[in-house]
Amino acid sequence: MPRNHLFSAGVAALLISQPAFAADDSAVDEVIVTGTRAADGVDADEIGSSVTVITTQQMKDRQVRVVSDVLRDVPGFAVSRTGAVGGQTQIRVRGSEANHVLTLIDGIEASDPFFGEYDFATLLADDVARIEILRGAQSALYGSDAIAGVINYITPTAQEAPGGRMRVEFGTQGTLGGAARYAVVSGPFDVVLNADVQTTDGYVTQTLPGGTRRIGSELQSFSAKAGYQVTETLKLRGVLRYSDTHAETNNSSFGRGVVDSPGSYYDAKSLTYFAGADLKLLDGAWTHSLSFQGVDAERDSYSGRKRSGGNDGLRKKASYVTSYRLETGEFTHLITGAVDWEKETFQNTSPPSAGADTTRRSVKNMGGVAQYDLQIGEVAGLGGAVRHDDNDFFENATTWKVQGFYRVSDMIRVRAAGGTGIKNPTQTELFGFNATGPFPFRGNPNLKPEKSEGWEVGTDLTFWEGRVSLGATYFDATLEDEIFSYFGGAGLPVACHPPPVGTSTSCNREFDSKQKGFELFATVAVLPDLTVSGSYTDLNAKENGLEEIRRAPHIGSANVTWKPLDGRATLNLNVRYNGRQLDSNFSGINTPFPASLPDVKPATGANAGKVVLPSFTLVNLSGSYDLSDQVEVFGRVENLTDEDYYEVFGFPTQGRTATVGARVRF
């Protein structure tokens, strides 16, 4: 598709010669709570690692309803969803695996303990939330899962965003959405209540000819956030969040010639919670934070309206963090220590017909963190952290991280970071899913955790009185002992015990996976009411010398935001480019592919057995107008050009949709 290649070249040229903005990166001028274990956070421009903040205003301007959509604008991010809203949604950062990024919701570790990763299909966007993102290994701060980075989805307190607001919207494909939020500060109390609902009848997702079944979904989330200022130095905090997802599925995506599968769907429920206390002593120089958090996740799948599979996962985590800040002239020292205790419990709850091992198991981990950061005036800073994890099932691990920056001038800042990461095996990888029944998958209790080591170097430029900010980052990482599913045939490592004939298992690879590339990101305020933004990522992710699947070598994003009529109106044009990429052919669809798979080709040579998904460009247009200080009307069109594309082979994506709605503030 020539226009896709032109777009890719255009974005690259824009960022090199006249930079735009990608959610904003190291030029962000605000405190980041995710970049350190210290309770007070750290300024974004004092971190050597790559940082992105998606602000509340950007979420509002782009009318984000599903969080994974806006993550497509982040440098280094590849997002893949199995078809319609509600389908499994994975995030791959800088060529990593989908379970290599730690996901936090208001600081709570949110991944499903059974699967070992977070399904972004279940996360609706609150109207006033913001997102902090760290790229690069962060296991020295957070332990397992943070090999490639951390995503922290944060909702504001009542003090930060007081008052109430309600939103309702409807659109094509039977889409109906709504949200309600109320936040109040009363003396020492700070309370926020929030609810989000998004439903759709969906669209026909059948790839094979003859499909007529629409795949819809119902997503709901309810949350409460509270704080109590006991004294000037002691504060109590709490968060409670419940999400409920019902999403229809089509088994025919994995069948051979079967068209539609009525009664196939999954239900996922998750309860996350947090309770903590913060104490400041010595005029705030010495801080203490004690917290307890957890997640209770349950998922059930159905086929022909009969329950066919399921799992439960439970995580409990307690943490104590203390920091001491010492200022001596131009030098500011920050010493932080943290202790984390965590227990994960998981169980396969599939019915007996699935042949599942339904043993309930638990894994405990104790981690200790030592972190030191030094800031030299506003000119330079450096820091490091080391963490040791003592696990009662896996081998113990020690990870580290170093980072620093130097401000060459008011215009130029250089930065660098490096570190190691780990990812523990999941319940399925260790103990299997179904020892008997169809397609038996047996676990491998001898698996080793995956390990990664990487580094990055970058520079940020700010000029034209701060109206232009741009930057570039080069990154390089190597993954060892990668865990993969072995389905028979060649490729079984010597150290991996061969499973019985007709079964599959998990193994650690004997060779390394490598990821390297560069990111460009910037912003320019062309006029006080006009901002142009964009990002571009060039990625080289290979496993044993072969290109990894679902990680396009070229990804770009551009945004134009115009606020005319003294800011009462907002228009946003969002363009996202995803280059051609490989995918596995698990669907069973044989060549020649049907006409419903436009431009999809079978891979050849060393990639034989895979498919090549063509590049695509998505255009979204949204606008809003304030009728008064309290009432706003809005509308948006997604996939404006009605692009026909695939993110996952065998799962058609959504065509053009239109939505209108209104928001009331009080």
Image (cartoon, grey):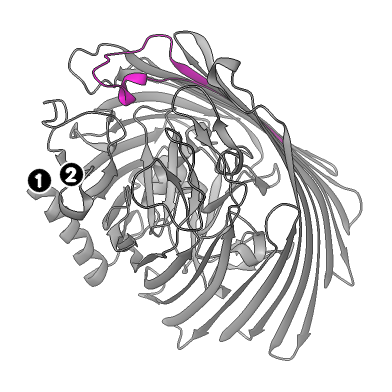
Residue toward you, 650 or 491: 491
Residue named by callout 2: 614
N-terminal label among 1 and 2: 1
Q: Where is residue 635 drawn, in percent x and y?
A: 34, 29
State the SS at label 1. Answer: loop
State the SS at label 2. Answer: loop
Crowding at dot 2, Cα within 10 Å, few <14 / some 14-19 / many 20+, comes out as many
Report how many numbered discs are placed on residues in the image: 2
What residue is at 27 percent from the left and 35 percent from the top?
649
Q: Quadrant of the C terminus?
A: top right
Q: Is residue 373 above or below residue 107?
A: below
Residue named by callout 1: 1
Q: CA separation, marks 1 and 2? A: 8 Å
Q: Where is residue 47 drawn, in percent x and y?
A: 56, 73
Residue toward you, 285 or 629: 285
Instruction: Inspect the magenta stretch and tell me whether residue 264 lies in it.
Output: yes
Q: Amino acid at mark 2?
A: Pro
Q: Is residue 496 above or below residue 310?
A: below
What residue is at 28 percent from the left and 55 percent from the top?
556
The answer to whether residue 599 is seen in the rendering is: yes
Provide the residue span drawn in magenta: 240-266
Q: Is residue 49 left or right of residue 360?
A: left
Q: Amino acid at mark 1?
A: Met
Q: Are marks 1 and 2 in contact (CB under 8 Å)?
A: yes
